[in-house]
Image (tube, rainbow, N blue to C red):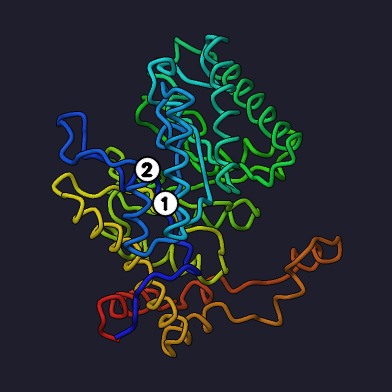
Amino acid sequence: MTDFTPKPEHKFTFGLWTVGSIGRDPFGDPVRDKKSPAELVNLLGEVGAYGVNFHDNDLIPIDATPAEAEAIKKDFRKALDDTGLKVPMATTNLFGDPVFKDGAFTSNDPKVRAYARQKTLKAIDLGVEFGAKTYVFWGGREGTETDSSKNAVDAIKWNREAMNFFCEYALDKKYDLRFALEAKPNEPRGDIYNSTTGHMLGFIATLDHPEMVGVNPEVAHEHMAGLDFMHGVAQAWEAGKLFHIDLNDQYPGRYDQDLRFASRDIKAAFYLVKFLEDVGYDNPRHFDAHAYRTEDYEGVKDFARGCMRSYLMLKEKAAQFNADKEIQAILAENIADDPAMQKFLGKYSPEKADALKAQAFDRKAIANRGLKYERLDQLTIDLLLGNR
């Protein structure tokens, strides 16, 4: 049997907030005791992860004194040194504290917008201190419950001003840092601005330094909206904007479940893994998910190991798909070049347009050709279920 042990080159990462989840939900109290950041790093080292990511307040509580903060950082750094784990990504919690109840960068209150910038600047410094190369922005409170409350155009402008500010700050400090924006359609707000990866890509094009800013798509967030996650990832990749990725699983149309990767829609997870491996994605594969509320910390370890194992099994299945002669024969037949059509395709020219308008096409003959997609899909199912 193939060895599915995670290795550093796989770049599997988890957030402190993922394995550190104590199982609280809107209807129930915590079911696991809280662990310190250093303890969580040691847990991740035990299961074979490559790295650990954090929000500022995952590491240092929002009301910590300077002395308390230094003690936490000292213990955290020692745990990193002991385990060899890296910190590839950091982010800011701009959604938990009551001050952000009506948004951070898009709050109507300029004092809140200024405080959100201050908090983010300090959090960027903290991330860079521990070696982060990617900084993620998830605007969990950047939205509304009623559109009576905000001017959406003002919110867009305020958000743009903030992102431009942080880009200039990173340039001024000479930080080796890229920013990644994370979309979500709703929850905790009724509606969140820039609700999909496509929205984020459009927004990035309006920034002063778009070359510094990409996206951090998350499986659950796109599936909540009933979208095909891999398609959004492909669009980001083609645009050169896939800076980071959040892997988990999700039932469409439900609250943000953050299920163990590939535990719900294994077929969608397969196509995602295949895409990432086929294009040579080499940034961290971050699992933004949580163990079931039923679990103790041994169960949390099972959850973390399961995320990585499922990815590696699907990676092997992707290689089998690419090597399967029947599958590849169907694909080759369907995407084969037709030399007679090349003169009509590619870039525009007046001559090409004239020739195309004069060409006679046999629509019925073209339409009558079967594409064998049913067979192709069943072969994929056979492969995933171990029958090829």
Up-down relation of residue 299 to residue 58 (above or below): below
Give percent across and percent down for residue 349. Answer: 84, 62
Give percent across and percent down for residue 259. Answer: 28, 50
Give percent across and percent down for residue 177. Answer: 65, 45
Q: Residue furthest right?
A: 350
Which corner quadrant of the image does residue 387 belong to? bottom left
Report which residue position mark 1 lands on.
Answer: 79
For the N terminus, the quadrant is: bottom left
CA separation in Å, label 2 and label 1:
9 Å
Viewer can see residue 206: no
The residue type indicated by label 1 comes to: Ala
Pointer 2 with pointer 1, Cβ within 8 A: yes
Nearer to us of marks 2 and 1 is: 1
Give percent across and percent down for residue 209. Answer: 73, 38
User: Residue 230, labelled with which disc?
Assistant: none
Residue nearer the viewer, 321 or 282 = 282
Position of 43 with respect to 33 (left or right) is: right
The local crowd at label 1, few if under 14, some if 14 to 19, many if 20 or more residues have their Cα within 10 Å, is many
